[in-house]
Image (cartoon, rainbow, N blue to C red):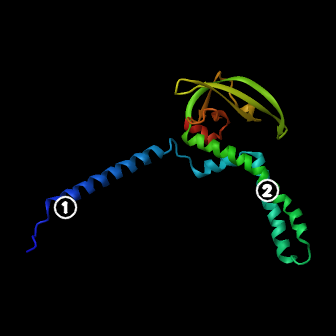
Amino acid sequence: MISKYKPLQEKDDKKNRRKKNNRKKTKTSEIKSKSTKFREITLSMKLKILFSDVMLIIGVVFFFSGLLFIVPFAITMNSMLPYWSYLIMAIFPVQGILMAINPIILKKREINLLENGEIAFGKLINAQPTNTRINNQLVYKLLFEYPAKDGNNYQATIKTHKTYKITTDEQKKLLYDIRKPTQIVLIDLLPDNAKLLFQ
């Protein structure tokens, strides 16, 4: 005759399963809490930061203007031109991509610092002019030194033509990457709506 009551071992197994599930839930919640960002940045703010670079805007214009020229031409006159002519026409979109790659990488890093970067106060120790000009303004290579949370002092450089935005304060507020302390962004150079996060 089969007993109506379940064995004690089966009950113990259920309890162990519940404990394991609870441990998994606590672990996943800990991981989620660790992966949460320090600051929530809106999409409009991200786009404003992304398209604040002139070279990126020029690259996007080159890319789409080249596509607008190539696609209709390829559809209507594909049998009248040799293949190498399309390679020549592809110069504009390819040039646009090449011009936009570096600004996209830099601005993506800037957005990441804005979301997850630690605040520090650095000192400008060197300003060196470069051979590059943007909007008829000379680009400068600025060297900053700042103390990080780990107790060490780090040096990091940024390049900008917007030196007029940098305040005359001796201590400059900046954001740095904990994992890569040489990556910084100066808060003075952020868009106005992003600066409000640090006032």
Q: Is residue 199 visible?
A: no
**What label does residue 10 carry, if any?**
1
Quick check: 24 left or right of 13?
Answer: right
Q: Estimate the spatial distance between the alpha carbons at disc 2 and disc 1, rounded to whole Å.
A: 68 Å
Q: Are marks 2 and 1 in contact (CB under 8 Å)?
A: no
Q: How many neighbours does mark 2 have within 10 angstroms: few (below 14), some (14-19), or many (20 or more)?
A: some
Q: Residue 160's image quarter?
A: top right
* Position of 117 relative to 126 (above/below): below
Q: Which element is circle 2 on?
A: helix
Pick the quarter of the image with the C terminus: top right
- Reading the image, the residue beneath label 2 is 61
For label 1, the crowd category at 10 Å Cα-Cα, with few meaning under 14, some 14 to 19 and many 20 or more, is: few
Looking at marks 2 and 1 on the same chain, the residue that comes earlier in the sequence is marked by: 1
Residue 31 at x, y = what percent? Answer: 43, 47
Q: In the figure, is residue 161 to the left or right of 86?
A: left
Q: Amino acid at mark 2?
A: Val
Q: Secondary structure at mark 1?
A: helix
Closest to the observer: 99 or 191? 99
Location of residue 156 in the rendering, given as x and y in whole percent from the top left corner: 67, 30
- Three-letter amino acid code at disc 1? Glu
Residue 76 in the image: x percent, y percent?
85, 77
- Label drawn at residue 130: none
